[in-house]
Amino acid sequence: MEAVLAVDVAHRARRLGHHVAGGGRREDGVSAGVSHILAVSITGRYDTWSPKQEQRLPHERTIFIGDIHGCAAEFEALLDAVVFRSGRDRLLLTGDAFTRGPDPLRVWELIDETGADMVLGNHDDRQLRQFRAHASGGEPRFKYENQRRTFDKLEHVSRQLLAWLEARPLYIEEEDFLLVHAGIHPDNGMAGTARDEFLRIRTWPAATGSIDGPRWHDVITPLEERTLVFGHDAPGGLVVHRAREGDRPWLVGLDSACIYGGSLSAWIQEEDRIVQIDSRQGDGSRWWE
């Protein structure tokens, strides 16, 4: 892959008339949050997106973003880097948007402002249980202290967030892509994938909690005419697989460990392009916090 530094974001922003609500801006129109942008050009352009739901207007671009984990500054900078245009672009998230990071509330505001959709992640699933307990007058259970901190920061919007998370699917399937959080069963396919596998599968054979070993996508047969997009696997990092050079990717993994000091990644489907923003979360020493 050819890596190029995107240095003219302001020019492109003015040319395309992009808009992202919120965030500090300089006079040239570039968000103050953009510190470093890595755009990776991938051979091949595709323009085959067609919505299944007739009531949804076609969008010019479909932009997928990996696990955000409360990293709002990186999320906002990435929206600027891809030149997100409200009402013209469709934004899809791989799940695990809020927990662990410093600013889950701003992440929620950006999701609301951009109209982003998302598949449910394993951390979101745990948050659902916590929000449900709170809504019913019970005491939420927290496995780690970072979960309590996230809950406290979101408590005053917990009813809105509960309703939104309850409506999030395990997968979004369309003619040219399949979006899941963690993955699918490599032998049994979609129909044979259990709920917990959609949320947590990583290695194969599956080993609960393991971050080492072959991945489920190392043994899966590529989907016909579709790209499988997933997140969850921060240890595995960014993944782009294609059958032949120049083909559209059949697999894109977008969890590039932003919360652990890596980067936040996006894939623009129609441009077949990866865009990344460097993490501001340190050196990865918080892996199991």
Image: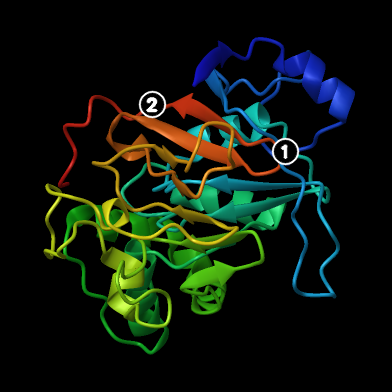
Q: Nearer the viewer, residue 222 or 52?
A: 222
Around disc 2, counting alpha carbons within 10 Å, would you say few (fewer than 14), some (14 to 19), or many (20 or more)?
A: some
Q: Position of residue 248 (x, y in %)?
A: 59, 42
Q: Nearer the viewer, residue 68 or 208?
A: 208
Query: On screen, 97 above or below 190?
Result: above
Q: Position of residue 255 (x, y in %)?
A: 38, 44
Q: Label 1, secondary structure: give it.
A: loop
Q: Nearer the viewer, residue 193 or 18?
A: 193
Q: Is residue 239 left or right of residue 161?
A: left
Query: On screen, 136 above or below 7?
Result: below
Q: Is residue 184 visible?
A: yes
Around disc 1, counting alpha carbons within 10 Å, would you say few (fewer than 14), some (14 to 19), or many (20 or more)?
A: many
Q: Which residue is mark 1?
A: 84
Amino acid, disc 2: Arg
The residue at the point 64 percent across, 67 percent down is: 174
Q: Which residue is mark 2?
A: 280
Q: Residue 22 appears in which quarter of the rendering?
A: top right
Q: Residue 196 appears in which quarter of the rendering?
A: bottom left
Query: On screen, 169 above or below 268?
Result: below
Q: Nearer the viewer, residue 69 or 172?
A: 172
Between disc 2 and disc 1, the foreground one is 1
Measure how far apart labels 2 and 1 are at the Cα level. Answer: 21 Å
The residue at the point 39 percent across, 64 percent down is: 121
Amino acid, disc 1: Phe
Q: Position of residue 205 (x, y in %)?
A: 14, 64
Q: Label 2, secondary structure: give it.
A: loop
Q: Is residue 159 left or right of residue 52?
A: left
Label 2 vs 1, first from the N-terminus: 1
